[in-house]
Image (tube, helix red, strand yellow):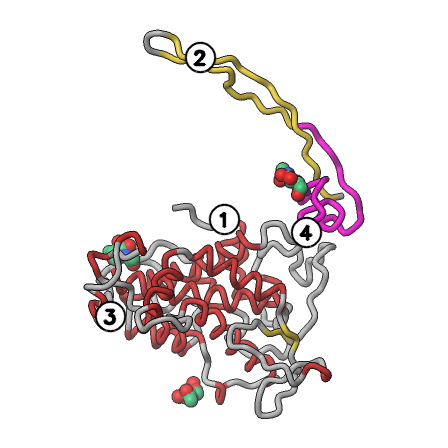
Amino acid sequence: RAGPPSALLAAVLRASHPRAKGQPRGMAGEWLGIAAAGGPEKAGCASPPLSRRQQELCKQKPELVPAIREGARLGLQECRSQFRHERWDCRPNIPVLCFVGTKETAFISAVTSAGLVHSVTRSCSAGNVTECSCDTNLRHGGSASEGWHWGGCSDDIHYGMSFSRKFLDMPIKNVTGRSGLVAMNLHNNEAGRQVLDCRCHGVSGSCAVKTCWKTMSSFEKVGRFLKDKYENSIQISDRLKKKLRRKEKSQRKIPIGKEDLLYVNKSPNYCVEDQKLGIPGTQGRECNRTSEGSDGCNLLCCGRGYNTHVVRHVERCECKFVWCCYVRCRRCETMTDVHTCK
Ligand SMILES: *[C@@H]1O[C@H](CO)[C@@H](O)[C@H](O)[C@H]1NC(C)=O
Ligand SMILES: *[C@@H]1O[C@H](CO)[C@@H](O)[C@H](O)[C@H]1NC(C)=O
Ligand SMILES: *[C@@H]1O[C@H](CO)[C@@H](O)[C@H](O)[C@H]1NC(C)=O
């Protein structure tokens, strides 16, 4: 099982850096810093990235510390994977801190909140938590081919959902700052959890459970779903009037869905390095000369052009089986062009 790249961890560690002006505490995913803490035994509840409320929860449930770390790690790793071809490649968390309220923050909130549900549920199913276990109601339903496992019981997602809410959703009363941002954050946390929620798509009673199980089986699917929501995310008004409203006045009648991702502030273009804002820029990023997509040199390099260098690969080739019993190969050299943004 590969961990997230260490650069990411280092960036996450810096999560303790000063908050952007006017940004309420606990809104910038500070808790994600726990992914970078030492071994499981070291990641105690007093970890600095946790808010006081989170530390209290953690002390009540020390057995969940590994799951909390795993949830953060899983979410960040999925973010990295979904954004690997974008100008903002989810490396690092720092834009999150500086550009609170952007689409990128929305994605991180959703994917890490889902990650937490996922890891806590796994921990329940493994029998690591006293209050929860796997869901034995379903012992006689389903078959292996439908993806049932854990010896005939399915993951009980409810405990994980409830823990993720308690852990991440700060009570709205205790937040100072712009209320649009807070509501946005809570909505996006929940949007991530909704993806994992057990839903029946209107077929039969048992299908709800099946959907739930299937979403638990692959976190990559969750990531892809949320990436799509990110592409179609909705800008909301910073000023709340009882409930969330779209910024675009002509569209206010269109309801905002539970799974939609919301943002308040427009994103920077992430093209050029800005150390003060923690944006690495795209200089030096590898791009694809023929792609029209976001990984194409044109878009990724923001029109600055690219450098090309030739990289030589040596590999075994034209292998032949020789009686008996070995394989004889030749060494082949191939040259590939690698393009990196200027
Ligand atoms: C359950 O706990 C054991 C022992 O602490 C640990 O090795 C394992 O990774 C945990 N499993 C899950 C899914 O959390
Ligand atoms: C708000 O914070 C205070 C102190 O941190 C805490 O005692 C109180 O329970 C919190 N309010 C809510 C609604 O959680
Ligand atoms: C570059 O993009 C083209 C077109 O999208 C694709 O077919 C090709 O596999 C990509 N090359 C690499 C190295 O990713």
Marks 4/1: CA–CA distance: 24 Å
Q: Which mark sits nearer the N-terminus, 4 or 2?
A: 4
Q: CA distance from mark 1 to mark 2?
A: 40 Å
- Main secondary structure type of the part rendered in magenta: loop
Q: Position of residue 159 (x, y in %)?
A: 31, 73
Mark 4–mark 3 distance (CA, rounded to whole Å): 43 Å
Q: Which residue is mark 4?
A: 294
Assess whether mark 2 and mark 4 are in contact (beta carbons under 8 angstroms).
no
Residue 322 visible in the current orientation: yes
Q: Amino acid at mark 2?
A: Lys
* Quarter of the image that includes the C terminus: top right
Q: Which residue is mark 2?
A: 320
Quarter of the figure with residue 171: bottom left
Quarter of the image where ligand 1 sits: bottom left
Q: Are marks 4 and 1 in contact (CB under 8 Å)?
A: no
- The residue indicated by pointer 3 is 132
Q: Does any atom of ligand 1 lie closer than 8 Å to the CB of label 1?
A: no
